[in-house]
Image (spheres, rainbow, N blue to C red):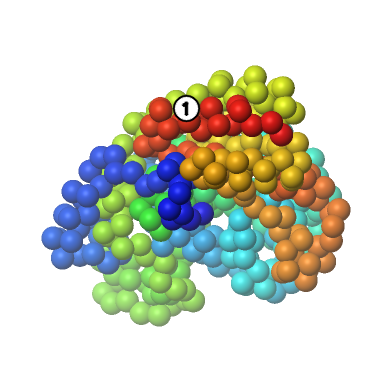
């Protein structure tokens, strides 16, 4: 969302330099290697692999491209079906539709706003090739149930973990359950390099081909490891490598992850505690975090009583120089979703949540006095 309005004093999001981002960026430029898979890219790979305990992490130009790589790795073909929550960003399903897949939308739980796992099995057919759970707001889906169903039917799971890096479900990191998982380092995420992403590979059988797909369909990675004496075109693929300059900036953010997350936790908890009384008095719901989930503190949202009160609060805050924003529209009711048979009433929880959800300003450098202004404005509002 744009923060460019002249009257906005407290934007929805702001990128902040926390650690060595600019130093690493300069070092990357001075090294003479600013394209992909340089020193900083490799350091990011190692940090993610060692911290999360995944066999392989590969930086990509976006989370969207990591999802596209997942579709390629799973050999998605025309006619295959891919199950996704209805309440998510278009990239989650577009990556698979690009390969000819048919989207199958599942409604969300009313508490965590994640894919409703109780509806999952009823959506599976002989054509189902993948399930793509999205950890909304960095709160884990019911991954034990989802993985059990997927394993019983022999279906691949790709976690869209754009919101949830370093969050946990029952003590295990999000992004380490499915065969594949994707991350986002877009400017609105906890850790950012402007535009960027990563593919996490938990099933080692995909590693070698992922390297080939990411390198324009060549075995260039094997060449640089000395495994072949020359590299050539061996598969389909594209250019998914993140610039090493951006990887340098990202590394600075990832290395400062404990500082960033500590501050984000403080901001989230302040919103939650300070808005509880107002919310209960005005039929507004605050985020729900199950006890078995350690969230990523990615966002803070309000669920207003109805669309009219949501829109009034957005305007009320904007008039006071505060930018708040809504989120996803139901995919099944979009122009493309209707082409695949979507109709009003198919996903009633998503339809209701989409009309009522409002996200508050949330970023590392949000000052306590700025947050206090946001809270004061909200608590003076009557839905």
User: As displayed, is residue 361 above or below residue 226?
Assistant: above
Residue visible at 34% across and 31% down? 259
Closest to the observer, 101 or 163: 163
Residue visible at 69% across and 55% down? 329
Closest to the observer, 156 or 337: 337
Q: Secondary structure at mark 1?
A: helix
Query: Residue 163, can we see it?
Result: no
Horizontal and vertical percent position of residue 281: 72, 22
Closest to the observer, 207 or 173: 173
User: As displayed, is residue 53 above or below residue 6?
Assistant: above
Q: Quadrant of residue 61?
A: bottom left
Residue visible at 17% across and 55% down? 26
Horizontal and vertical percent position of residue 320: 52, 40
Pointer 1: residues within 10 angstroms few (<14), some, or many (20+)? some
Judge left or right: residue 129 versus residue 174.
Answer: right
Horizontal and vertical percent position of residue 171: 53, 28
Judge left or right: residue 252 versus residue 262.
Answer: left
Q: Quadrant of residue 137?
A: top right
Horizontal and vertical percent position of residue 284: 70, 30
Residue visible at 53% across and 27% down? 376
Judge left or right: residue 151 versus residue 63.
Answer: right
Quadrant for the C terminus in the image: top right
Judge left or right: residue 366 versus residue 378.
Answer: left
Q: Name the residue beneath numbered marker 1.
A: 372
Pick out the residue farthest to the bottom.
233
User: As displayed, is residue 51 above or below residue 128?
Assistant: above
Closest to the observer, 53 or 286: 286
User: As displayed, is residue 220 above or below residue 242?
Assistant: below
Query: Residue 229, can we see it?
Result: yes
Pick out the residue farthest to the left.
30
């Amino acid at each position: 969302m744009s923060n460019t309005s002249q009257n906005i004093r407290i934007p929805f999001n702001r990128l902040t330099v926390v650690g060595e981002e600019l130093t690493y960026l300069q070092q990357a430029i001075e090294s003479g290697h600013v394209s992909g898979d340089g020193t900083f890219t490799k350091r990011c790979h190692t940090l993610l692999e060692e911290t999360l305990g995944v066999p392989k992490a590969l930086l990509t130009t976006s989370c969207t491209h990591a999802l596209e790589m997942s579709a390629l790795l799973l050999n998605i073909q025309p006619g295959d079906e891919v199950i996704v929550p209805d309440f998510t960003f278009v990239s989650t399903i577009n990556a698979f539709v690009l390969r000819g897949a048919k989207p199958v939308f599942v409604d969300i739980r009313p508490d965590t706003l994640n894919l409703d796992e109780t509806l999952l099995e009823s959506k599976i057919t002989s054509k189902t090739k993948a399930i793509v759970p999205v950890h909304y707001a960095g709160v884990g889906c019911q991954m034990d149930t989802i993985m059990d169903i997927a394993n019983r039917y022999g279906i691949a799971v790709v976690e869209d973990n754009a919101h949830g890096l370093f969050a946990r479900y029952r003590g295990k990191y999000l992004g380490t359950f499915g065969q594949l998982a994707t991350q986002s380092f877009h400017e609105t995420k906890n850790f950012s390099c402007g535009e960027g992403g990563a593919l996490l590979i938990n099933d080692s059988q995909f590693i070698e081909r992922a390297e080939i797909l990411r390198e324009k369909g060549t075995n260039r990675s094997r060449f640089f490891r000395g495994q072949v004496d020359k590299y050539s075109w061996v598969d389909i693929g594209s250019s998914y490598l993140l610039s090493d300059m951006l990887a340098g900036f990202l590394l600075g953010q990832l290395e400062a992850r404990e500082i960033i997350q500590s501050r984000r936790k403080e901001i989230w908890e302040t919103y939650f505690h300070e808005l509880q009384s107002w919310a209960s008095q005005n039929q507004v719901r605050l985020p729900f975090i199950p006890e078995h989930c350690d969230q990523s503190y990615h966002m803070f949202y309000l669920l207003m009583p109805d669309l009219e009160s949501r829109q009034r609060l957005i305007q009320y805050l904007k008039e006071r120089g505060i930018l708040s924003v809504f989120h996803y529209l139901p995919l099944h009711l979009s122009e493309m979703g209707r082409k695949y048979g979507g109709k009003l009433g198919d996903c009633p929880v998503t339809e209701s949540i989409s009309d009522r959800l409002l996200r508050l300003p949330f970023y590392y450098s949000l000052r306590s006095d700025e947050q206090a202004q946001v809270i004061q404005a909200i608590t003076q509002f009557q839905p």
